[in-house]
Amino acid sequence: MSFGSASRRPLAAAPCPCGGGTFGTCCAPILDGGAAPSAERLMRSRYTAFAVGDTTHLVRSWHPRTRPDEVVADGGTEWTALEVVEAREDGDAAIVEFRSRYSHGGRAGELHERSRFVRRGGRWVYVDGDVE
């Protein structure tokens, strides 16, 4: 499965692609292997991983039962904006609804998804989502 663009990790002081502050204090610690404190933060880190081409984080944060056999960065997609519409946690399960904007081949697009997450071994993981 192919996602995002080739690896281009921002500097720590640069704005985080997810819009949540500076990269070094927002998504970098999670991309570096730290546990996300919430499903929303994991979703934001996954968006950032798509934006910077960090397939290692995408694989690590995807539930093994639903993860594709192969996750490959796609240099043709540029992720440009993220809007979290709603985030709800209920114990060890969560739903995060978001809209992400992208450009591919010079054409703008939007992905609107309601993603499902579960806490597994004390860490949030992405299960799947419904694209709206």
Image (spheres, rainbow, N blue to C red):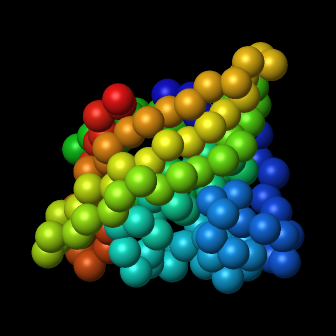
Q: Quadrant of residue 89?
A: bottom left
Q: Is residue 89 above or below residue 129?
A: below
Say which residue appears at 37% left-offset and 74% top-offset. 38
Residue 110 appears left or right of 127 = right
Residue lying at the far front of the rendered structure: 85
Residue lying at the far left of the rendered structure: 91
In the depicted view, which residue is nearer to us: 101 or 35? Answer: 101
What percent of the width, then of the height, locates residue 64? Answer: 29, 49
Residue 49 appears left or right of 121 = right
In the depicted view, which residue is nearer to us: 125 or 88? Answer: 88
Q: Is residue 62 visible?
A: no
Q: Is residue 105 above or below residue 20?
A: above
What percent of the width, then of the height, locates residue 93? Answer: 18, 64
What percent of the width, then of the height, locates residue 117? Answer: 27, 57
Q: Is residue 48 above or below residue 120?
A: above
Q: Quadrant of the C terminus?
A: top left
Count of numbered marks: 0
Q: Is residue 35 visible?
A: yes
Say which residue appears at 46% left-offset and 69% top-offset. 41
What percent of the width, then of the height, locates residue 26? Answer: 63, 76
Q: Quadrant of residue 65?
A: top left
